[in-house]
Image: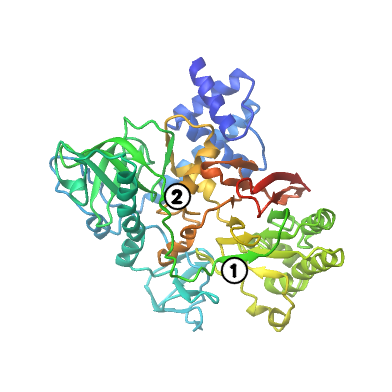
């Protein structure tokens, strides 16, 4: 029992929480884990999610906390069972079974679209309304539509025009409602295709492969005692009877349920028992495995390579690198990074923003990065309370931006030429609900949105990259996606690691992507045509990666000396939060990131 207690304590510490001191609380935690069939890691993740939703912090302190968690999990379980009663799920097929024929991923997708995630939409109109710029839904009866999901009732609603979002000035249109399955398959496999030959050349050049190692499509399906190298993306096998009522669901990834899919759609099972190199794996990640495929159905993996960073694989260099912004400068450069919300739960007066800008006037940074949400949909009831007859984008342009501009002008008066970058968030009430996300659209803010002086304010895409300093400079990657939380919920870690957060950040760097997870979370509406925009630019080394999360704030140096920063939120409910101050030296050849501090407002 003491071993279980110690394992539970380790998991709480990995999430940045001090474990419960009372042994009885630990006993009740283990009891809940056993009842809900959860591992200690899963239990700690469930507690973190519950605590965030209920404005709690740290690990459970009393038996009452554990009891509330138990009731919460039981309620979720009951709700899930009710939702699944009328859901027809595809029957799982064990591709390693002797009785089943070998199947490609295309065969899986033809079986009731297995593996295709729900694709949310940004905006929809009432029945028979027309909007030629966004799309047009017409149909027989009712379509209950709201931001994020469309639930169709009775007669079918026929799309007459695909909803599109245009990355302004970047020459690409993103479809985020009606992606066709063949396109989705091709887009997700394109990165595997790029990595395959690069992995082989890299490992061969470093004498890491045996002379008789075979590679190519036959490695997935041809039985042989010879060593093979297979490159593909990670998938998860279906699990039989995982629910108490016998409903079939997709299992969480583990060493026994991991599949590898080639760029041609061939799928093979992986035996990862011999892998113990401290690797974080999640569905969608591109890896290369060495091993033996003795029966043509399962690869016994002897080595796993997940580091695509060293391959320099990214969007083609011929493509215009329109997500990169450059700030000229020399010497030490101070950067401030803050994440929303910038309003409290009861007010849209931007009090947290005022507190932050007061700090900016004191510290005088050359670069200010503000990451949304700026005015989240959850704040719209606050507008109703004050009976404000104003659109959210008008509030943004008439109140938020003038505050920022006034701060930048005061810095200019003090001799500091500062620039501010704004990164949108999926929760913003006037942003496009699609990933990759275009810059904030201020076209509905009237004349003010077009004529407002924006000399020192730049609207960025999500994700974006900025370079501070001339020449090589310091490269900073920015996003507002909650990838750490999504990745933590879906990944498994093989072998010992320093801590879980560092392992997750290392996985992002190795995959050269801000969102390597696929299928994505239900809250992340990825357009597969823009998957390349989630990757780091080709042959572009990253120095700092900003990954906002509701998890505990941190600054960690991980793989390839990339510094990962979670600045925390500038406002936590009605309390002041934190932001990050980063001091960089663009002229340095080695130590470019001098200091990172997470500061309380």
Q: Is residue 546 visible?
A: no
Percent of width and height locating residue 479: 58, 57
For the residue pair 66 and 26, the one nearer the viewer reads as: 26
Proximity of marks 2 and 1: CB atoms separated by less than 8 Å:
no
Here the colouring is: rainbow
Label of residue 431 in the image: 1
Seen in the picture, residue 508 relative to 369 is either above or below; the reply is above
Q: Is residue 19 visible?
A: yes
In primary-sequence order, the first of circles 2 and 1 is 2
Single out the residue that lies furthest toward the top: 2
Res 334 → quadrant: bottom right
Res 226 → quadrant: top left
Percent of width and height locating residue 259: 29, 44
For the residue pair 539 and 259, the one nearer the viewer reads as: 539
Q: Residues within 10 Å of mark 1 (few under 14, many from 20)?
A: many
Q: Residue at x 45, y 50 (%)?
A: 309
User: As drawn, is 38 to the left or to the right of 590?
Assistant: left
For the residue pair 19 and 455, the one nearer the viewer reads as: 455
**Distance in Å between CA atoms under marks 2 and 1:** 31 Å
For the residue pair 374 and 51, the one nearer the viewer reads as: 374
Q: Residues within 10 Å of mark 2 (few under 14, many from 20)?
A: many
Seen in the picture, residue 312 relative to 161 is either above or below; the reply is above
Tag 2 residue: 309
Percent of width and height locating residue 268: 24, 45
Seen in the picture, residue 9 relative to 107 is either above or below; the reply is above
SS under mark 1: loop
Percent of width and height locating residue 374: 68, 62
SS under mark 2: helix
Count of numbered tags: 2
């Amino acid at each position: 029992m003491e071993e279980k207690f110690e394992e539970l304590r380790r998991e709480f510490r990995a999430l940045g929480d001090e474990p419960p001191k009372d042994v009885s609380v630990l006993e009740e935690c283990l009891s809940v884990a056993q009842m809900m069939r959860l591992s200690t890691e899963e239990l700690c993740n469930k507690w973190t999610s519950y605590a965030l939703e209920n404005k709690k912090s740290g690990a459970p302190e009393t038996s009452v906390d554990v009891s509330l968690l138990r009731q919460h999990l039981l309620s979720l379980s009951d709700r899930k069972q009710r939702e699944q009663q009328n859901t027809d799920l595809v029957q799982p097929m064990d591709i390693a079974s002797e009785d089943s024929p070998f199947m490609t991923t295309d065969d899986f997708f033809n079986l009731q679209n297995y593996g295709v995630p729900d694709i949310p939409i940004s905006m929809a109109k009432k029945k028979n309304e027309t909007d030629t710029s966004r799309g047009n839904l017409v149909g027989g009866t009712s379509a209950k539509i709201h931001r994020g999901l469309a639930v169709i009732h009775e007669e079918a609603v026929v799309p007459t025009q695909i909803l599109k979002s245009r990355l302004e000035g970047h020459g690409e249109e993103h479809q985020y409602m009606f992606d066709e399955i063949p396109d989705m398959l091709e887009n997700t496999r394109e990165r595997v295709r790029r990595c395959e030959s690069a992995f082989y050349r890299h490992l061969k050049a470093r004498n890491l492969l045996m002379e008789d190692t075979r590679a190519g499509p036959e490695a997935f399906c041809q039985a042989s005692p010879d060593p093979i190298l297979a490159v593909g993306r990670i998938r998860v096998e279906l699990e039989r009877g995982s629910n108490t009522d016998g409903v079939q669901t997709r299992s969480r990834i583990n060493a026994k349920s991991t599949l590898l899919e080639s760029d041609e759609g061939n799928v093979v099972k992986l035996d990862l028992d011999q892998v113990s190199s401290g690797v974080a794996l999640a569905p969608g990640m591109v890896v290369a495995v060495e091993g033996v495929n003795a029966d043509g159905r399962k690869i016994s993996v002897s080595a796993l390579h997940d580091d695509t960073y060293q391959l320099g694989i990214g969007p083609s260099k011929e493509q215009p690198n329109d997500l990169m912004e450059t700030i000229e400068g020399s010497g030490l450069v101070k950067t401030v990074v803050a994440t929303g919300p910038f309003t409290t739960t009861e007010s849209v007066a931007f009090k947290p923003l005022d507190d932050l800008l007061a700090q900016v006037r004191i510290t005088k940074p050359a670069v200010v990065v503000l990451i949304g949400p700026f005015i989240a949909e959850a704040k719209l009831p606050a507008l109703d309370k004050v009976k404000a007859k104003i659109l959210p984008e008008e509030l943004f342009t008439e109140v938020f931006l003038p505050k920022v501009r006034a701060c930048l002008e005061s810095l200019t008066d003090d001799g500091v030429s500062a620039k501010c970058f704004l990164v949108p968030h999926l929760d913003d009430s006037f942003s496009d609900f699609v990933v990759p996300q275009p810059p904030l659209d201020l076209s509905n803010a009237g004349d003010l949105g077009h004529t407002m002086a924006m000399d020192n304010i730049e609207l960025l895409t999500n994700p974006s990259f900025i370079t501070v300093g001339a020449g090589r400079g310091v490269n900073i990657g920015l996003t507002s996606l909650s990838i750490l939380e999504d990745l933590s919920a879906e990944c498994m870690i093989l072998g010992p690691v320093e801590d879980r957060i560092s392992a997750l950040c290392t996985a992002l760097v190795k995959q050269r992507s801000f969102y390597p997870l696929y299928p994505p979370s239900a809250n992340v509406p990825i357009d597969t045509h823009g998957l390349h925009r989630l990757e780091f630019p080709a042959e572009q080394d990253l120095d700092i990666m900003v990954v906002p999360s509701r998890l505990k704030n941190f600054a960690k140096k991980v793989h390839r000396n990339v510094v990962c920063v979670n600045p925390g939120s500038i406002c936590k409910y009605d309390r002041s939060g934190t932001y990050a101050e980063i001091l960089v030296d663009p002229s340095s050849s080695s130590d470019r990131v001098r200091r990172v501090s997470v500061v309380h407002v």
